[in-house]
Amino acid sequence: MLIWIVLALVLVPLVALALAVRPVLARLPQLRRAAVALQRRAAEAEALQDTAETLQQRAEGVQRELDTASRRLAVIKAKRG
């Protein structure tokens, strides 16, 4: 009788644990795919951020050139006028 009690005390928690872990193990492939997709999106976001920074620097350079051209044009107009 004692053996049945000990077996029940050992086996019932093991069965409960197996039943609790089963859904998680069943979803592991989905979770892996989601993790890979997240990593890919993070890499794409980083690449887009790098591109945005490059474009920002280029826009600042164009703005400086525009300011220089505007000043030169003002000097030319002042000399004529």
Image (cartoon, helix red, strand yellow):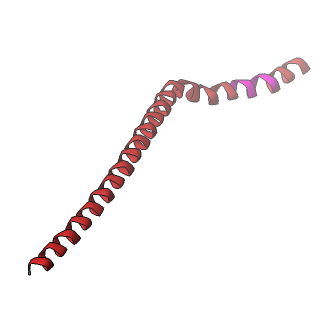
Residue at 45% across / 40% down in the picture?
A: 42
Q: Quadrant of residue 10?
A: top right
In the image, residue 41 lies at what x, y percent?
A: 42, 38
Q: Is residue 44 left or right of residue 12?
A: left
The residue at the far front in this view is: 79
The residue at the far right in this view is: 2
In the image, residue 58 lies at what x, y percent?
A: 32, 52
User: Residue 14 in magenta?
Assistant: yes
In this rendering, the answer to whether 58 lies above or below 5 is below
Q: Is residue 76 left or right of residue 9?
A: left
In this rendering, the answer to whether 50 lies above or below 20 is below
For the residue pair 75 and 27, the one nearer the viewer reads as: 75
**Which image quadrant: the C terminus?**
bottom left
Q: Which residues are magenta?
A: 10-16
Residue at 36% across / 48% down in the picture?
A: 54
Residue 31 visible: yes
Q: Quadrant of residue 72?
A: bottom left
Tell me the chief SS of the magenta region: helix
For the residue pair 75 and 43, the one nearer the viewer reads as: 75
For the residue pair 7 and 24, the one nearer the viewer reads as: 24
Residue at 50% across / 24% down in the picture?
A: 29
